[in-house]
C-alpha cells in the first residue's frame, strides 16, 4: 500500500476535487481514514464485509445454513455501506446550493430537533439523539432541509460525539460562508445504556460555537430557542 495521504482512484465523479476530499476527512476534526480508504467501490466493500460477517457469526457458533440468518451477513454489509456508514463515501455528501438572501433576513436562524442516528466508534452501537443548529446569514442562505442532510451525512460514520459536533459546524461554515454558526447535540449512547454502566437515562450534550455565538447574549438567545 502506498504512503500517499489519500487514494481517490475509484471515485467516479468529477465535481469533487481531491483537495476537497482531503479537507473533508482531514480537516480540524478528521475522521481517521487509512490511505486506501477509497480503493474499493461500494459494491466491493459490501462483498468483503459480508464475507467477514459470515466468519463472525460462524465463529460465534451460529449456523449460517439456517434460513433465518442465511442472508444476514449480506444484509448487514449493505446496511453498513449504504446506510449506517454512508458518510464515509464522499459521493454521498449532500450537494448544497447557496441562494442570495434577497429578503435580507439578518437575525438568527435555528433548525432544532434534527434527528441524529450515528454509531459509537468504540463499541459500534447506536448513538441516537437530536442536533440543533443555528447561523446568521452572511448574505447566503441554503435550503432548510440541507441542514438536516448535512447533519445526517456526518452522523453516518463511526463517530465520537465531540468530533461529530465539530464536523457539522465546519460543514455549516463552509456551506453558508460564515463563521457565525452554532451546533448543539444531545444524544443517548447505547454503549452507556445497554452495557457497562447500563444507564438508560443519561444523555451527552456537546456544543460548538463560533463567530457571533461566542457572545454570551447571542448564545443565550439560541439556547432559549432550542429549550423544550
Ligand atoms: Zn461507545
Image: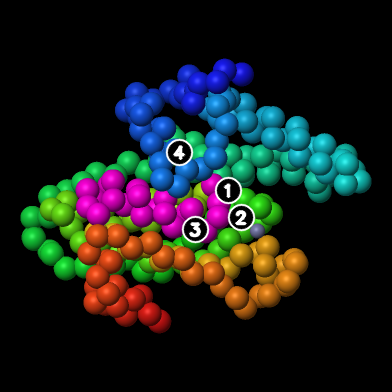
Residue pointed to by mark 1: 158
Front label number (3 vs 2): 3
Q: CA distance from mark 1 to mark 3?
A: 12 Å
Residue 17 occupies quadrant: top left
Quarter of the view holding residue 2: top right
In the visual, does 178 lie left or right of 124? left
Along the viewing direction, whichever of 165 and 129 lies nearer the viewer: 165
State the CA–CA distance, disc 1 to disc 4: 13 Å
Image marks 1 and 2: residues in contact by CB distance under 8 Å: yes
Give the mark nearer the N terminus: 1 vs 2.
2
Range drawn in magenta: 157-179
Mark 2, ligand 1, within 8 Å: the answer is yes
- Say which residue appears at 50% left-offset and 21% top-offset: 4
Q: Mark 3: which secondary structure?
A: helix
Q: Quadrant of the N terminus?
A: top right
Give the residue number, with chain letter if any, for mark 3: 162
Closer to the chain start, of discs 3 and 4, is: 4
Q: Is residue 152 above or below residue 110?
A: above
Secondary element type, mark 2: strand
Task: Give the image location of residue 7, x and y in percent.
Answer: 50, 23
Question: Does the numbered disc 1 mark a residue whose Cβ is under 8 Å from ligand 1?
Answer: no
Place of residue 222 in the rendered image (x, y in percent of width and height, measured from the top left) = 29, 73
User: Mark 2 — residue?
Assistant: 120
Q: Residue at x 45, y 47 (%)?
A: 29
Q: Main secondary structure of the magenta part?
A: helix
113 relative to 31, above or below = below
Amino acid at each position: 500500500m502506498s504512503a500517499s495521504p489519500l487514494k481517490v482512484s475509484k471515485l467516479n465523479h468529477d465535481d469533487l476535487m481531491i483537495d476537497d476530499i482531503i479537507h473533508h476527512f482531514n480537516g480540524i476534526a478528521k475522521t481517521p481514514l487509512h490511505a486506501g480508504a477509497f480503493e474499493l467501490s461500494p459494491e466491493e466493500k459490501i462483498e468483503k464485509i459480508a464475507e467477514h460477517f459470515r466468519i463472525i457469526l460462524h465463529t460465534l457458533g451460529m449456523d449460517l445454513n439456517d434460513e433465518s440468518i442465511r442472508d444476514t451477513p449480506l444484509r448487514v454489509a449493505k446496511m453498513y455501506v449504504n446506510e449506517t456508514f454512508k458518510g464515509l463515501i464522499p459521493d454521498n455528501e449532500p450537494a448544497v446550493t447557496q441562494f442570495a438572501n434577497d429578503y435580507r433576513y439578518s437575525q438568527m436562524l435555528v433548525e432544532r430537533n434534527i434527528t441524529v442516528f450515528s454509531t459509537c466508534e468504540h463499541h459500534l452501537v447506536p448513538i441516537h439523539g437530536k442536533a440543533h443548529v443555528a447561523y446568521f446569514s452572511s448574505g447566503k442562505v441554503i435550503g432548510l432541509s440541507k441542514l438536516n442532510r448535512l447533519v445526517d451525512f456526518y452522523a453516518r460514520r463511526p463517530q465520537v460525539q465531540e468530533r461529530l459536533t465539530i464536523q457539522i459546524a465546519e460543514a455549516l461554515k463552509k456551506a453558508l460562508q460564515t463563521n457565525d454558526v452554532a451546533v448543539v447535540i444531545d444524544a443517548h449512547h447505547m454503549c452507556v445504556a445497554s452495557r457497562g454502566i447500563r444507564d438508560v437515562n443519561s444523555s451527552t450534550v456537546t456544543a460548538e460555537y463560533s463567530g457571533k455565538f461566542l457572545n454570551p447574549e447571542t448564545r443565550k438567545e439560541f439556547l432559549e430557542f432550542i429549550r423544550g
